[in-house]
Image (cartoon, rainbow, N blue to C red):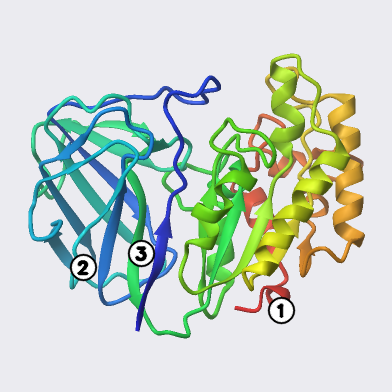
């Protein structure tokens, strides 16, 4: 048996210049969060993070609940912990079973001013926030609900040594922007429902770029932490490029060039292969007509086509999955098919997320 990842959540700094949601902090409040597990096991341990915090983070009480009951979260036997800035803490193992595809409920009581929280900003899931210590309450009446995931980097589960695990590493098309909040209809969720063995972890960050920081550390910078650090990993699926091509337009900068993106993808593939991983690359999804204005530019659209032609023909990757073809409008391929569009021209709705997941050939994934 080994400890591996049953759930992961890629986090960002609340102090970035580009912000897609409002950062926040807490004081004398309980924060309850739903963690939709990719994998499961008979025992679990929770990973908390203060990676981007500027002050120590005090957690005075915490509980974990699954379909099998509720347990008190401790750290070296203590219910209270202080996590220094830039540090992470791993809870003591809990004899609390959790199944793949089940929800785990994590409740944290934060007694002191936290400062702005390290967080996942667009997880397609709401946190519940209420004043005082209510970590053991069955329900949080009159709680504030806000989309976001705070101070959580993952949940480990105890699994057999031959458990097969992959990670979806990329941007909002993995994290779940555009899908119904709270419904677990992210593309990665649909992909996990197709698998007969193993699971895929979601390490998407909405707005994330392959080549430049913000939103989040760029893909090449966070690859070691968010991919290579996962025990038992065999495959990595990548979807990057939309934000490299679209985000610069919001500030009047030129988009990344196709040559720069191809160089970045090649470097990513080399690092994956060096670590013994198989890498599957997605073609870059369509985003013509995206809002707000400035994201979709003729230069960016042209670069997307060039990179996608390369992804479809190169032997740099072990396989590719043609997300672009799966969700594009056949009559206008630079646009998302209207029935699959979340409404902003740049993200997929639930049906689109399912189409993205169905583009993955399970034979090439091979879990």
Q: Residue at x 8, y 38 (%)?
A: 133
Q: Residue at x 70, y 55 (%)?
A: 268
Q: What crowding class fits label 2: few (fewer than 14 Cα within 10 Å), some (14-19), or many (20 or more)?
A: some
Nearest to the eye among marks 3 and 1: give it: 1
- Write down the quadrant of residue 279 in the picture: bottom right
Inter-mark Cα distance, 3 to 1:
25 Å
Q: Is residue 188 above or below residue 163?
A: above
Q: Is residue 323 among the parts visible in the rendering? A: no
Task: Identify the element where label 2 is drawn.
Answer: loop
Q: Which residue is mark 3?
A: 102
Task: Identify the element where label 3 is drawn.
Answer: loop
Q: Are marks 3 and 1 in contact (CB under 8 Å)?
A: no
- Name which of mark 3 and mark 2 comes first in the sequence: 2
Q: Which residue is mark 1?
A: 363
Q: Residue at x 86, y 49 (%)?
A: 308
Foreground pick, 66 / 234: 234
Q: Is residue 275 among the parts visible in the rendering? A: yes
Taking 293 as reference, is 328 left or right?
right
């Amino acid at each position: 048996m080994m400890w591996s990842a049953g759930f992961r959540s890629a986090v960002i700094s609340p102090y970035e210049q580009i912000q897609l949601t409002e950062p926040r902090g807490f004081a004398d409040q309980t924060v309850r969060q739903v963690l939709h597990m990719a994998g499961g096991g008979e025992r679990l341990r929770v990973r908390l993070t203060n990676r981007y915090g500027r002050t120590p983070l005090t957690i005075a009480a915490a509980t974990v609940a699954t379909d099998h009951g509720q347990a008190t979260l401790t750290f070296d036997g203590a219910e209270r912990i202080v996590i220094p800035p830039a540090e992470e803490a791993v809870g003591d193992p809990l004899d609390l079973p959790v199944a793949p595809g089940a929800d785990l409920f994590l409740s944290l009581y934060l007694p002191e001013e936290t400062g702005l929280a390290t967080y996942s900003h667009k997880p397609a899931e709401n946190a519940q926030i209420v004043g005082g210590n209510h970590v053991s309450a069955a329900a949080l009446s009159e709680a504030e609900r806000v989309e976001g995931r705070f101070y959580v980097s993952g949940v480990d589960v105890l699994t057999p040594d031959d458990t097969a695990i992959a990670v979806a590493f990329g941007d909002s098309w993995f994290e779940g922007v555009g899908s119904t909040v709270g419904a677990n209809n992210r593309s990665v969720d649909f992909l996990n429902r197709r698998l007969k063995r193993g699971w895929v972890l979601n390490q998407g960050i909405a707005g994330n770029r392959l080549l430049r920081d913000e939103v989040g550390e760029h893909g090449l910078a966070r690859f070691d932490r968010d991919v290579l650090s996962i025990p038992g990993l065999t495959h990595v699926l990548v979807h990057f490029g939309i934000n490299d091509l679209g985000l610069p337009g919001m500030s009047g900068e030129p988009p990344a060039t196709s040559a720069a993106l191809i160089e970045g993808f090649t470097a990513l593939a080399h690092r994956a292969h060096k670590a013994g991983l198989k890498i599957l690359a997605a073609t870059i999804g369509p985003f013509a007509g995206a809002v707000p204005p400035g994201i979709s530019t003729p230069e960016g659209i042209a670069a997307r086509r060039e990179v996608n032609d390369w992804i479809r023909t190169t032997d740099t990757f072990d396989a590719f999955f043609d997300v672009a073809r799966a969700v594009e409008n056949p009559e206008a391929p630079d646009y998302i098919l209207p029935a699959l569009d979340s409404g902003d021209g740049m993200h997929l709705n639930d049906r689109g997320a399912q189409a993205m997941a169905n583009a993955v050939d399970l034979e090439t994934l091979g879990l």
